[in-house]
Image: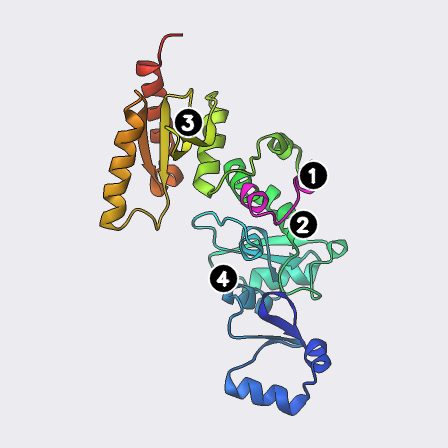
Amino acid sequence: MADFSFLTTDELRAEGYDVERIRAEIAGGALERVIRGWYCRPGADRGAVRAMRLGGRISCVSALALHGGWLPPDAGLHIGFPSHASGRRMARRTAPEGTVAHWHPKAASTGSAFAVTPLEHAIADLLVCQPPQFVVATLDSLLHRRIVQRNRVGALILHGPLRTHFLASRLHPASGSGIESIVRFGLGSAGIDVRIQVVVRGAYRVDVLIDDWLVLELDGRDTHAQRDSFTKDRVREATIMRDGRIVLRFSYATVMYDWAFLLACVQDVIRQHAPVR
């Protein structure tokens, strides 16, 4: 079976399928014909199905999310199209609103042989397409989950646009979430040194620690929603502050959509409360 619940006609035949069995499984819902020569199981990603039917393959952040990477908010559907003239005409004619087109040269081998753009080609699209903080967050997640090796990522970055080369030294496999990577990268770019995933008071692992006294806790979209979590978080914060530390908590929405506010808060707190050395 091909990756991501997609199969080619040849793969089905190798498993003993004939025309009648393929038709029967389509009728019964066990298979879906995507395009000529390609079928999918019910669990196949619908974005990937849509990309194939538009004449391309899912790519960039959309493909990397299927490979196991972090997905930026409001990303849309990223599709890689062949760069020849007919491919460009196809994209202009059929790609609906909310899709982002990437042009893949023939030598990239990201076309009809794959249901989803391969990992390394998707990373190449990422470097061209996304802002630095999203590149870092996505690559951090791939490294954290050991989906790709650090030296390979570094080589891909050096083969990418010159403006992204500095990112090779800004990655951190320990980052456990996209928003943590974005905060670490953003504060570092502002000249604020941070540490991540630090244990304080022997028991509490904090998301971000600045100069051993300022703690940043970051809430994901789906966490801290239940009442017991709310209470537990407040006890945790009060315990951390017993050593004289300050805790600032920021939501996913603040990190993603109001970075200027977050940075200003951190800078103001540092300016007012940094201990004298």
The type of residue carrying mark 3 is: Leu
**Residue placed farthest to the bottom in the image?**
20
- Callout 4: helix, strand or loop? loop
Q: From the viewer's perspective, is the residue at label 1 or at label 2 nearer?
A: 1
Identify the amino acid type marked 4.
Pro
Q: Earlier in the sequence, mark 1 or mark 2?
A: 2
Question: Could you say which quadrant of the image residue 14 lies in?
Answer: bottom right
Q: Quick check: 68 left or right of 264?
A: right
Tell me which label, 3 or 2, sits earlier in the chain. 2
- Residue picked out by circle 3: 209
Horizontal and vertical percent position of residue 178: 47, 42
Please report whichever mark, 1 or 3, sits nearer to the chain's N-terminal start.
1
In-image side of 99 versus 166 (left or right): left
Q: Quadrant of the C terminus?
A: top left
Residue range (magenta)? 140-160
Mark 4 sits on what residue? Answer: 96
Q: Which residue carries the number 1 mark?
A: 151
For the point 50% across and 38% down, the residue is 175
Separation (CA) of disc 3 from disc 4: 43 Å
Q: Secondary structure at mark 1?
A: helix
